[in-house]
Image (cartoon, rainbow, N blue to C red):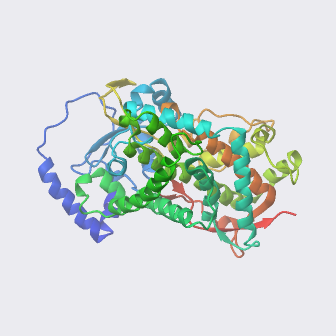
Amino acid sequence: MLFFTFLLADPIGIALLGALLFWGLFCFTRPKEPAGKWPPGPTPLPFIGNLHLLDLRRQDKSLMKISEEYGPIFTIHFGLQKMVVLTGYEAVREALVNSAEEFADRPPIPIFQHIQEGQGIFFSSGELWKTTRKFTMSSMHNLGMGKKLMVKKILEEFSFLAGLIDSFKGKPFKLKLFNMAPTNVTFLLLFGDRFDYQDPTFVTLLRLIDEVMVLLGSPFLHLFNFYPFLGWFLKPHKTILVKIEEVRVILRNYMVASRQHIPGGYVTSYIDALMQKQSEEPKAETYFSDANIVASILDLVMAGTETTSTSLQWAVLLMAKYPEVQAKVKDELDRVLGASRLPEYEDRKALPYTNAVIHEIQRFIALLPHVPHSTSVDTHFRGYFLPKGTPVIPLLTSVLLDKTQWETPNEFNPRHFLDADGNFVKKPAFLPFSIGCRVCLGESLAKMEMFLFFVNLLQRFTFHPPRGIKESDLDITPEATFTMRPQPQSVCAVPRS
């Protein structure tokens, strides 16, 4: 009854329930879908489907609970929307790897339809998606993503982050401070240069990204996605669209500046690469129109900054909460790197415990529970028939917490990635970046950033809770936004001698 509890706890929710029932009068006699062999699932109620079984803020945990009764593939009704859910490593991998092309599309999610209108990298489908993604991967590689040049840029950015941390002189500061450095690395690729942390444009973008991500996790935003016809009644999606337009204004200004030296100029950013491509292929407006270019940059500004920034917040919080793990990491770093040598990305091979801790942080936090896919063609999967366009949820949380793959899935345990001799062990179920043809295109950069920032931070600082707060008091219950963020908290960073 979680959904009803949410609605009845708020006057707006009561009015919303009345609106849903009113709408149901018009939907009750609509023709039913042709019968097919869909996966089993809980019986839907009129109008609300299975929403009464869901915690809107933690849909992933609710879906995992339902899978205990109906198995790794089941049907769920989000209001009037019928979807298929895949849980556990085996089912998710079978769909996204063995049947990658069949599950490659995205369904039309109302909020992202309003924002991107089917354009961009993450929420487009078909040839537009393939062309845009391929171009983006190539451009990012040419700009240094995954190369040694990027190691140098990340280490340079860390020096600014370390200076900021030093300025607090061991006093508490908010975890959100760790957003700045990873965001700046992404902005370096997108805009061609880093920002000063006090730069008005940088501060504005950080604020807008934060506000949009919080709103995307709002229960009322989920209700808008379930019942888009109630858009007139709900507020969060309207606020998101206003804030997104503020971001677009900034992006368009950078596009105008880029056009002044492209074509013929030196490409120093993703925006430059897009402008050059557009100027070279004016007839290819289907794929490199201004609308798709803005949407593609917007995707990377939002998702490309949120994931690594939030992961770094979690890393520091977990080290402060588990000082024994932090101490073992420091001991290994001291033995292998010493106190002053800057790390290289290749050092991870000589740092098995540190590498295991970083992987366990990303597994444990289950940062992005899922991004829906949809079938690109009529698909037969595990004995079921999924018509073209069927929305499918590959539940990544269920993979990262799969009891068949992890010894203690609900505990923070770096031993998940170590063998009996202390050697690092790769685990196939480690899929925080998803898998298959929709795997995160910034995976290589995210891994490099996470390793280099984490190692540098623990070489230079010891993290602990503010005075008067015990390690056990630090809250590691996620705050559900677009990603699973840590609760707003503060930590202290004491320089190591």
Find residue 259 and report its horizontal and vertical position in percent.
Answer: 48, 47
Picture residue at 33% right of the left edge, 47% below the top: 113
Which residue is more in the foreground, 336 or 414? 336
Find residue 368 and report its horizontal and vertical position in percent.
Answer: 51, 48
Is residue 310 visible in the rendered structure shown here? yes
Find residue 82 and report its horizontal and vertical position in percent.
Answer: 29, 41
Picture residue at 12% right of the left edge, 53% below the top: 25
Picture residue at 48% right of the left edge, 37% below the top: 277
31 horizontally vs 48: left or right: left
Classify 159 as above or below 264: below
Tell which residue pokes out farthest to the bottom in this image.
468
88 horizontally vs 325: left or right: left
Which residue is more in the foreground, 64 or 491? 491
Classify 138 as above or below 157: above
Q: Quadrant of the C terminus?
A: bottom right
Q: Quadrant of the N terminus?
A: bottom left
Classify 94 as above or below 332: above
Find residue 492 and report its horizontal and vertical position in percent.
Answer: 72, 68
Is residue 415 visible in the rendered structure shown here? no
Which residue is more in the foreground, 445 or 215? 445
* Label tally: 0
Locate residue 202: give its quadrant. bottom right
Which residue is more in the foreground, 365 or 49? 365
68 horizontally vs 322: left or right: left
